[in-house]
Image (cartoon, rainbow, N blue to C red):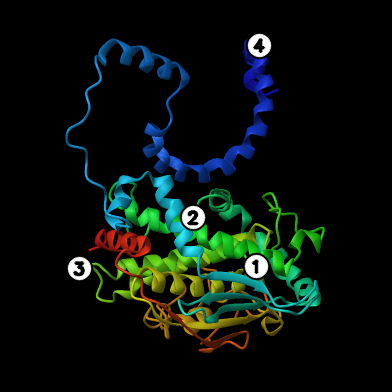
Amino acid sequence: MSIFSISNPGNAGNAGNAGNAGNAGNAGNAGNAGNAGNAGNAGEFVPPAISGALVTNRDGIVGTYRHPANPPCHLLENDPANLELWSPRVRGLILDADMIAPVTVTYTGRAPSNGKPVVIEHRSCDGTASTLFSLTRPSQKQFLAQTRRVASYADLRGDRAAEILSQTGDLISFMGTIGLLHPERTRWTLELLFCALRFTTLIEMRMKHAMSCRRPVEYSAQIQPMIQTPGHGAYPSGHATEAFVLARIMDALTRQRSIEVYEDPSFWSEQLYRQASRIAVNRVVAGVHFPADSSAGASLGLALGEYILARLDAGGDVAGHCFDGIEFGDRDFDRTEILDHFLSQHGGGPNPDEGTADADGDANVGPAGEAGSDKSSAPASPPYLTECGAIEVDPPCSSSPLAALWQRAEREWR
């Protein structure tokens, strides 16, 4: 009992409120803020009480039936303009169906085994299947070695607790601080980003299942994560994947600005990728991921982001990439070498971090004293990340819902 309770005995009854501490677990519901967009669904549900009132109301006013003389014309079939007539939930289902249709995730082993890659393939209109991303997992020994890194990152938990808790269910708000995301002003951009996240989640979860990698807490009793360890595999990191998908798409959108406020337009990109990196590293700080998880997730996110942009806009050739977990060794997460591999080759321009100081304090370096924290210039292609051919993405037809969504989102940034 506090000193204030002693001076005012009437407050003693408030001690029962201590039980409300259990509600702290509801912090994870912050991610549901994104559901505000579902307000448009209000007209789809009529409460029972209102339904009864509508029945009696009709009986009172309808009068004698009169047959319509001029029925409305048919809407054009498969017209992207019709998307604006449907509810956000229905639009989402249409977009999801189109996005996932040509994509498969396949584990190449004929039976449960070790050392086989999981492969994302794109199937073109002529039926040709090409590799978009291939992933193999690190060894048990490598993950064990990385527990030391995870334990070291725990020193940052006090500084980052608020971020980590908020990011358990909400990444859009953090990306929305760079550029402007608003449910009215950028409604199509938000629908695009949520579509990309839903697609990404399907892919990453299938890959997590195929790789079936344990979490840090299963290797060491001293990791003691600061949040609930998720109930699925660690590798690749879903948060890292999603954050870099968002960063890549917003990178493309911010380049549509008609007026550039910086002498170097890549400064927008720099901020976006630093934000994505911080989200990825925060999962290691929280104790639920290894640096290998975040590195694989960042690489997967950039590959998927590039692929999504091709599907939305003009199509064309998109490079396939292979992430080799064995080659990753006991490295720390390094944003610079991953971006060097991707962005200098695929329309994102040169690495926005090249020649700049690292301002976020963790994107390219580990905690003080960690092996590998002294980074200088990163190699253009790290040994664990290589190109593996190219896929030809067919340009979207004029009636494509995906193309229509991109055009609407793009206009919001001009």
Q: Amino acid at mark 1?
A: Met
Mark 2, Cα crowd under 10 Å, few <14 / some 14-19 / many 20+, is: many
Q: Position of residue 16 (x, y in %)?
A: 69, 20
Reply above or below: 345 against 247: below
Image point (67%, 65%), residue name: 208
Q: Would you say the residues marked 4 and 2 are in contact, meaning their CB atoms lie under 8 Å apart?
A: no
Q: Earlier in the sequence, mark 3 or mark 4?
A: 4
Image point (31%, 61%), residue name: 404
- From this viewpoint, is residue 323 visible? yes
C-alpha span from label 4 to label 2 = 45 Å
Mark 2, residue position: 171
As rendered, which of 86 and 413 lies closer to the eye? 86
Q: Amino acid at mark 2?
A: Leu
Q: Which mark is residue 258?
A: 3
C-alpha span from label 2 to label 1 = 21 Å
C-alpha span from label 2 to label 3 = 27 Å
Q: Earlier in the sequence, mark 2 or mark 1?
A: 2
Q: Nearer the viewer, mark 2 or mark 1?
A: 1
Q: Which mark is residue 9?
A: 4
Q: Which quarter of the figure is the C terminus placed in?
A: bottom left
Q: Which mark is residue 207?
A: 1
SS class of the residue under badge 1? helix
